[in-house]
Image: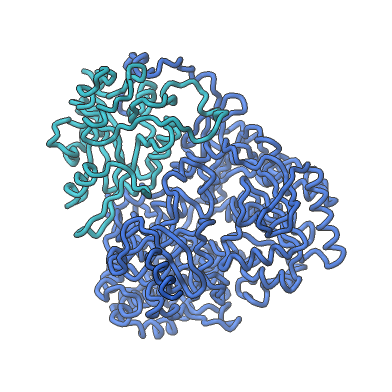
Amino acid sequence: MTRRYGIIVDLNRCTGCMTCVLACKQENLTPPRVWWDKVLEIEGSGLDYITYVRYACMHCDDPPCVAACPEKAIYKRSDGIVLIDQAKCHGRGECRKACPYGVIDINPEQDYFALPKPPYQDTGESFRVHPPGKATKCTLCVHRIERGREPACVEACPSKAMIFGDLNDPGSTIRTKLWQAEQLLEAQSADPKVFYVIPKNLSKLLEERIVTNPHMDRLP
Amino acid sequence: MEFRGPSGNQELYNQTGVKVVSPEKETVGYTFCDGCNEVPFCGIKFYRKGEAVTRIEPWPGFPASPLCSKAYATLQRLYHPNRLKYPMKRTSPKGSRAPAFVRISWDEAYDTIVHHLNRIKELHGPHPVFFYVGDPKEPRASVQRLAYTYGSVNYGTESSTACRRAAQLAEVLTYGFPTTGDLPTEQTKVMLIWGTNPAYSGQPFMCHWQLADAKERGVKFIVVDPRKTPTASTLADIHLQPRPGTTAALAAGMMHVIFEEGLHDQAFCNKWIHGLDELKAYVKGFPPDRVEDLTWVPAKKVIDAARLYATNAPGGLKTGAQGTTHDLNATNNHRAILMVPAICGYIDIPGGVTKPTSPLEGMPFHWAEAPASFCMRDKLAAMNDKRLDLEAFPAWAEKFFEVQTNYLVEWIREGKVKAFLGWGFNMMIWPQTHEYQQAFADLDFAMAVDYFYRPQTHDFVDLVLPAAMNFERLAPFAYYGRTLFGRTPVKPAGECKEDWQIALEIGARLGYPDQFFNGNVEAACNDILGMFGLTCEDLRKNQEKGVTVPAKSPDAFKKYETGKMRPDGKPGFDTPSGKIEALSTVLQRHGYPALPEYKEPMPTSKEYPLILLTGARVPYITHSKWREDSPWLLELQREPLLMINPEDADLRHIGQWDAVILKTRYGQMDAKAKPTIMVPKGIVGVMHGWAKANVNELIPRQFDPISGFPPFKEVPCTVMQASSASAKKRENM
């Protein structure tokens, strides 16, 4: 059977420690202000707790970004991973408008350091190269999955808040926990393959947050 | 790994058309992270091409694992263009507004240091030279050896300024052994986590998953923290949020309930607690209603927590390095916490608070203390009377060889300190930082070893020496329990040298080439490893798994019954009374309050109605580090944030990200407001260590009389909109 990769994020275990954010940054070397993997902080009136939410591309089964791209640069692999072909992308940003989750960015011109590039940016690995002006988002660390490893964020999580696996495999850990988890913005019918175990009374607040501001808290 | 091998369509993820370089061309290396100055270190496995590091990941199977955000950022830090790469000497007056430095050779740097050290020794003896290790802790062994061989007793660290030692003093005085508690075991039924947030910091590092697993298997959690930390949010069955500085009252309240309801372990108490009657009489004065008034913790919660903890044996404990000791009652506040598991009999039993049975011989407390023999601590007895902190902090001086540093200002003014040799030190650690900066500018000579030029410190020293970073260091090796691990460094950038090498080379040039292995770092490590019949080469041969030195005896519990707690082999605890000391005989002898007494914190007032809580950890920042060291991390928070409860913010018309002024009787600073329930009403939180907003300037130079610790979590303050403050100023003009 074909594989269908997904993640469950257990928000009862996420502490907002930012390890996944930096593990992704170090693995994929995304440019300044582009964070494929983010952590959102949610608190609101009526709740007496703060919840942290690991947040990135949902690798939807019915991804609105694919249809929206005029260049047909976005595609879904047979294993369900959604990728942007950087050669075809013209950076028009239609995918950004179409994505209900607000997780697509456009690569900036700037880099963190002036030239010469630090040696870790010069390894020739395609997944660590981010041409300016192109649309960019989480690849589910497809390059790691191909080598039999979990995405960097999942492997790095110090609280073991994430489960990665094949949603088509009835014996997988992800499947055994799936009944506890839900999709965000289910009504959008994009059928996301990143699921969340959500604390009581939080779903509405969380969905409001990602609709209004899907970015990490930063000073304006 | 549950999913199966590659799908085969590799070309599809080659999104940019760039040729994929095969990973085989890379080789692997191993090192440790110094991101948070924690020991034992966390392990990093890295990939290298020649001398270049290309990526990092957690060291598989390493006991201190997984890594955190800061560890990943050490890769970017390594190649930061602003790194110090050459020794530099000052050419402008110290403290001048336009500090000027020129590059010099290592020879000139060492000649300068040796000249000053010899001159001072000749004129005033060796003790006015102060040796200091800040962050990282790694060079402590080599710098101690240098200090004591040169002949100065005055060696101190960040631990002996404001970090671990006050809590450790409380532990040693009370239990006779140092402990920050244990992780829950299969036996543990209830955990008391007090004043620490293991989700972000503390020992063992990044252990939150183990606590979360314990919760899932039914362990109950009591979390004591004024703040709504992720530890409290994800784990707490009962969360107690005390007013800062009132720890001893809350602990007394819990003990009041436990004694009143007969929930204590009477047999253990009678046999093993010194001062039991005095303690009982003291906590009688802390009924839950009074405790609510003093601590803001509802009486019912005090009762519930006491019952939950005392009736679910065995109970564990997790305390922090310093979260509970940043107030003017630091030592006795922390002693009060320690008495709660003690009266329940939870000491040195499975699932409780244990003392390790078989710490590695010769180096029991990790690199924070380092091996006594290598460090030449046998020289200390003969010169102990020259310690500068002897008079001010006698109980401390009795228990620790590290000198308490907070009176450096006075010692420099009085001419008792004339030179300062510092590795990784930062003047912002001290309250009223500017007083230390001014004092340092008056020293005959000061030297700093560091990764970057840090103006708040280096503007006030004569020499700045470039340190090799974690990927470039051989020393020290790591050990965890009884297993030792080595590292495989790449060549340092520029003319950087590792901390140990600098200390060893200074020692060699001072006239002790043999004692300092002619500056050879590996030889120095081998000298220590020789205690176990090992060398660095043995560690390299067993690189990933390390080398385990077998224990002579299996893990044992209730060692106070068998004589394994005390060096003299007699039953009991390693305290003067042989018991856990509710009534500290050492404190009594030095004229301190000997019970873990409550002391009312500084009062708030109409002018300063809020309490300033500093020092709480942000997971991707450590102290003053990581602001400029790695843009990856700086991007997560560029400005100093002031956490204020939404109700307190509304009252002052303060909105998210508003520019605000934070003010105490002692100073003020600018920040951006973040209204959040992270802090309760009446408390504001600020991260320390921002050079442009150094909150320690708002803290007075007042100290806990026992430990000398400053009140970083106690000072009354006020917060106002920056705009309304400037409007007020205009009105007054």
Q: Which chain is cyan?
A: A
What is the x, y in percent for residue A79? Answer: 26, 21
Nearer-the-camera pick, B234 or B728: B728
At 56% from the left and 34% from the top, the residue drawn is B30
What is the x, y in percent for residue B164? Answer: 53, 62
Specify the farthest residue to the right: B122
**Way the structure is coloured:** by chain
Q: Quadrant of the N terminus of chain B?
A: top left
Label tally: 0
Nearer-the-camera pick, B298 or B369: B298
* B151 over A167 or under it: above or below: below
What is the x, y in percent for residue B270? Answer: 42, 77
Specify the farthest residue to the front: B733
At 23% from the left and 26% from the top, the residue drawn is A65
Q: Chain B: give its colour.
A: blue
Nearer-the-camera pick, B84 or B531: B84
For residue B271, say whether it is visible.
yes
Q: Classify residue A109 as left or right of residue B140.
A: left
Q: Quadrant of residue A196?
A: top left
Q: Quadrant of residue A36?
A: top left
Nearer-the-camera pick, B262 or B516: B516
* B283 over B715 or under it: above or below: below
What is the x, y in percent for residue B349? Answer: 42, 61
For residue B272, say whether it is visible.
no
